Each structure stands twice: as C-alpha cells, then as structure tokens.
Amino acid sequence: MNDQQLLRYSRQIMLPDVDIGGQEKLLNASVLIVGLGGLGSPVAMYLAAAGVGHLILADFDTVDLSNLQRQIAHTTARIGHTKVESAVLALRELNPGIKITCIATQLDAIALAEQVVHVNVVVDCCDNFATRFAVNAACVKHKVPLVSGAAIRLEGQVAVFDARDPNSPCYRCLYDADTEENLSCAANGVLAPLVGVIGSVQALETIKIIVGFGTNLMGRLQLFDARHNQWRELKLPKDKNCPVCACS
C-alpha cells in the first residue's frame, strides 16, 4: 500500500475491525455488481470509495431522464449512454486507483458463470426475478457470497446468501421459481432515498464479507419500511427441499 492509499483510506484503516490488513483485502478483492440503477449506483460508489480493487459492472440498459431521480451514479449529460459507461465515469472521478470492468450486455448462464467464478462477492442490484434466480444459481454453484437487495415504493429488503456455509439458505429458498410478480419502479414508483438506504446496506455487507468482521445477514432477511422508518428482521432458514442449494 503506497502513501496515497494510506491517506485515502486512513479513516477506514483507523478502525480496529479493518486496519491495514482489512484494507489490503479490499484492494485485492473483486466484486460483481449486477445492475447499475437505483441500488447499484450507491453500491458501486461506496465500494469504489472504500477501495475495492476491481469492480465488474453489469447492466445492458441506458440512462433515461426518469432514472435521475434516484440513480445517483448518472447525470443529465449522460442520458442515452449505457449505464455502465455512465457509472464508470463517476467511479473513476471518485477513485482512479481501482480497476473497473464494464459489461453492457445481458448475462446468460454461461456469461454469469465466467464472471462469478473469479470474484469474491456478487451484489444483486437488478430489478427482475429471472435475473435474480440466475445470479443466485451461479453463486450457489460456484460457492460465492451473494448480497441481495430490492426496493419498491416505500419498502426495501436486503439479505446475504453464502453457499460456502452449508447452513446458508439461498435466494431460491426465499422465493419460488413460479413467482411472477415483477414490480417495477416505472409502474409502482419508488422514493429516491429508499434505494440509497438499501444500497448502502448492501455495500456495508459486501465490505464486511471481504474484510471478515462482524456478523453479516446470512440467514436473516431485513425489511425496511420507509414510511415509518422501521426495520424488521426475519429468520430465513435453509429449505431442505430447495432445488438449487439443498444438495450444495
């Protein structure tokens, strides 16, 4: 770690739970972020600021005017750009010392596997069940921790699924494959700071997993009610009959 890095990350290094060893783990880590919208924007920005050495950004969508109310990595000047192109400009201004890889195509099962196998953590910031199930399956197969988040209207949720632990549930334990209710922000609305709250928790959980301190959200589902500013936590056990993780 050079002098510039010691100064940039000094406030984290001061923390006994992080220290120089933890910061070096962050600098040597790779994280795949799936989705660069409302959740992916704060996740990417906080992980870049914290010094995660390699961020892989995956999103095939483009920036639209309606995104700017909540997707803080993007700007009015970058409307029409792909979200990964827009995000990388923001992240490089924030921290030019990290590596960023952009994937502006939809990830199929093969492409997901190619990316997941090389990262320390996957952060699911997408907005549809099909992608969430595919990301989960890849993480279970390759035993890579998954930090999952979702937000709609005035409600959000976040959880950690870690296939390295035989007792960990997976996303498929939480939702059945027949789930068809794909709620969209376009159809239902979402409050801007809500995605910031959930995305920040996702970034926090990712850092904790990489550095290895504290207790993460594995086996717990946290639900946030923005209307009343209340958190509720549910225990999420492993489904012994889960078709994805029961035999993992």
Image: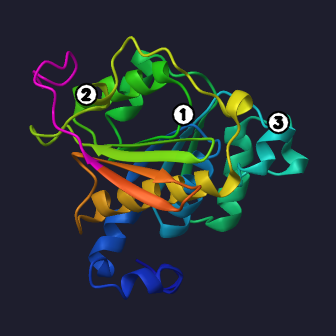
Q: Earlier in the sequence, mark 3 or mark 2?
A: 3
Is 18 placed above or below 217 here? below
Identified by mark 3, the residue type is: Asp
Image point (46%, 86%), residue name: 10
The segment highlighted magenta reads: 234-248
- Give the residue pinned by disc 2: 173
Identified by mark 1, the residue type is: Cys
Image point (76%, 32%), residue name: 62
Q: Is residue 228 left or right of residue 64?
A: left
Q: Residues within 10 Å of mark 2 (few under 14, many from 20)?
A: many
Image point (65%, 27%), residue name: 60
Residue 98 seen in the figure? no
- Give the residue pinned by disc 1: 126
Q: Is residue 237 magenta?
A: yes
Q: CA distance from mark 3 to mark 2?
A: 34 Å
Q: Is residue 240 left or right of residue 220?
A: left
In front: mark 2 or mark 1? 2
2 and 1 marks in contact (CB < 8 Å)? no
Residue 64 numbered tag: 3
Image point (54%, 46%), residue name: 155
Q: Is residue 155 left or right of residue 208?
A: right
Residue extending furthest toward the front? 228
1 and 3 marks in contact (CB < 8 Å)? no
Q: Residues within 10 Å of mark 1 (few under 14, many from 20)?
A: many
Residue extending furthest toward the top? 178
Q: Is residue 9 left or right of residue 89?
A: left
